[in-house]
Amino acid sequence: MIIGCPTEVKAGETRVALTPQWSKTLTEHGHTVMVQTQAGTKAGFTDEDYKNAGALIKECIEDIYDKAEFVVKAKELKPQEYGLLKKDQIVMSWFHLAEDVDFDMLHSMLDAGTIGIGMELIKLPDGTRPTIKPMSEIAGSLAMLEAIKYGLVDHGGSGTLFRKLSGLPAPKVLILGGGHAGLNAAEIALGLGLQVTIVENYWKRIAELRYMLPAAEVVCWEDSTVYNLISNTDVLLNTIYAIPNQPCLISRVVVRGMKKDAVIIDIVGNGIIETMHYTTLLDPTYYEEGILHYNVANMPALCPKTATKALLMASGPYILAIADKGLKRACAEDPALFQSVCTLNGKIVHDEVARNHNLPCTPFNLGMLD
C-alpha cells in the first residue's frame, strides 16, 4: 500500500502522524511511505531521519494526496486539503464528526468519496478509546500548566499565581469531567497544593476518582452545586465533550458571576460553556464577561515530541493493520477499527455521527468495501 503523511496545516499544529520508526516498520512490511518535507521537523524528526527509514520525501502536499492510497494525519483536514481528496482514498485522522463538526470538511469528504477513519471513534469493548487516551492525558496535564501561565501578567492575566503558598489560602480549581483529561489535570493541581473539586456524572467513576485522588473533592453534577462552585473558583477547567444541538451547561450568566481574576480553560471546544469559542495556539486567549478564556483544541501540539510518540503508540498498530491486511480484513478482525469508519462512498456510515447531526446514515458493513 502507498501511505502518505502530509505536513499538518492547522494553525500552531506541530505533531506528525508518522515517526521514522513507524515509517521503517511500514517499509519493511513492503509498503511505500511518502512524507512531505519538514512534516516531522517540529516533532524532532528531520527529512534525513525519514529517508534513512526508507520513506520518500515529497516537496508538496499535492504529491502526497495524488499518490497515496492511505493518508494518515495528526489533526483534522483543513480547507486547503479538501480539493485534494480522492474517491476510495483512506484518510485516517481526528475528524470529531460526532461532535462540533466542521460541515465544510464533512461535505468535502462525502463529495470526494473519501473513506474516513476517525481515530477518536476507535473504541475497545470496555469502552476505552485507545487513541484518545494519551492525547487526553497530555491535554489535561497541559491545561493546568496553561492556567498557571495565563494567570500571570506577562501573559495577559490578572497577576494571580495558582499555587499554594505559606500563609495564603490555596486557590480553588474546578474540573468539569473526571475522564483521562480531568484526572491528569487534577493530579497536576493537587501537586501544586491547590483545592481541587471534580464534577462527574457517573457514580462508578466518582468512586474510582475518590479512591485515586483522596485529596480531591469529587461530586456528582447538580446544577445549583456546580454554579455555586463556579462562583468561587479561581480556575474553571472543562474536559466534557458537548453533544451537538444541546444547550450549554454553563450559561453566560454563570460566567458573569465568576471572580474577575479567574481563568477558564476549555480543552475540548464549544458547547459546554456559553462564552467559549475556539482559539488557536497562535492566539489562545480572549476576555469575555471580564474573565480570561482559553479554548485551544490541539493543546498536545505544545509538546510535539512527547505527543507524537504517544499518539503513534496507540495509532501505529491500526495503521500497520490497514496497510498489511487492507481495510476490509483489518475491520473484519478488529471490531474497534470497524466502528471507526465514518464516511464511505459519499455517505455517512457511522450512526453516532449521523444521529448527532440529524443526518441520514447508511450503516457500515464489510460488503461496502468490495
Image (cartoon, rainbow, N blue to C red):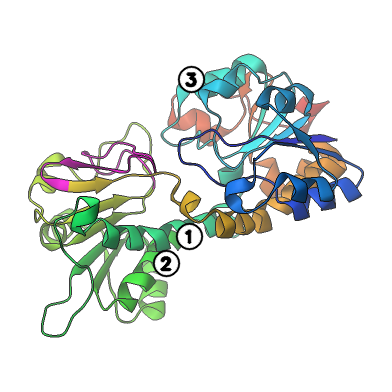
**Amino acid type at image mark 2:** Asn
* 253 lies left or right of 40: left
Q: Residue furthest bottom?
A: 166
Earlier residue among tags 2 and 1: 1
Q: Which residues are magenta?
A: 268-291
Query: Mark 3 or mark 1, which is nearer the start of the sequence?
Result: 3
How many angstroms separate mark 1 from mark 3 (CA)?
29 Å
Quadrant of the rendering where the C terminus is positioned: top right
Q: Which mark is residue 104?
A: 3
Marks 3/2: CA–CA distance: 33 Å
Residue holding disc 1 = 138
Q: Nearer the viewer, residue 179 or 28?
A: 28
Side of 319 relative to 16 (left or right):
right
> In the rendered image, which quarter is residue 288 located in?
top left
Residue sitting nearer the eye, 305 or 295: 305
Q: Left or right of 357: which side holds 247? A: left
N-terminal of the pair, mark 3 or mark 2, is 3
Q: Is residue 365 above or below residue 147?
A: above
Q: Main structural element of the magenta stretch: helix, strand or loop?
A: loop
- Callout 2: 10 Å neighbours few (<14), some, many (20+)? many
Residue at horizontal 58%, vertical 20%?
A: 82
Residue 315 location in percent, x, y?
67, 51
Report the residue marked by disc 2. 184
Residue at 60%, 19% in the rendered image: 110
Query: Around disc 3, counting alpha carbons within 10 Å, would you say few (fewer than 14), some (14 to 19), or many (20 or more)?
Result: few
